[in-house]
Image (cartoon, grey):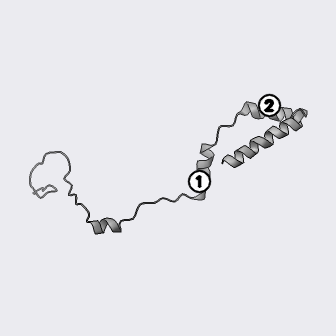
Amino acid sequence: MEIRGVDGQTGPAAIGQARVNRTTPTPAAQANQQADSVQFSPMAQALEMYRQMPEVRADRVAAARAAIASGTLDTPEHLAVAADRLLEDLLSG
C-alpha cells in the first residue's frame, strides 16, 4: 500500500505551515464585491437595549414604594422633579 501526502509526494512530510495559494483580485473583481452586512431581529435589538440599561437600584425602588405608600412622595415638588427627569430622559434618547 502506498500512502501519498496532500501534495502528491510519497513518504512522510514535515509538519509545518499549510501552503496557501493567494491571488490578488483584479480591479473588475474588486468592483463586483459587495460589502458584508448584518441585520438584527427586533428581539435582538430589544435585548441589546435591555443590556445597555442601567441596573435597578432595589434600595431606591423600595424607598420610593414606601414613600408612595405613606403619602410623602406625592408632593408637587417631587412631581416636578420626576417630570423634568422624564423629559430629559426622553429628549436625550
Residue 74, above or below 26? above
Residue 60, above or below 87? above
- Residue corresponding to mark 2: 63
Residue 75, above or below 32? above
Determine the image quadrant of residue 88. top right
Residue 31 shows which numbered tag?
A: none
Identify the residue shown where x is 89% and y is 32%. Answer: 72
Where does the image place residue 55, in percent across and percent down from the top left?
65, 37
Number of numbered discs: 2
Quarter of the rendering occupied by the N terminus? bottom left
Three-letter residue code for mark 1 = Gln
Looking at the image, tell me whether mark 1 or mark 2 is earlier in sequence order. 1
Identify the residue shown where x is 57% and y is 59%. Answer: 41
Residue 10 in view of the camera:
yes
Where does the image place residue 8, in percent across and percent down from the top left?
12, 58
- Residue corresponding to mark 1: 45
Identify the residue shown where x is 9% and y is 54%. Answer: 10
Where does the image place residue 70, in percent across and percent down from the top left?
90, 32
> For the residue labelled by badge 1, is the local secondary structure a helix, a strand or a loop?
helix
Determine the image quadrant of residue 79. top right
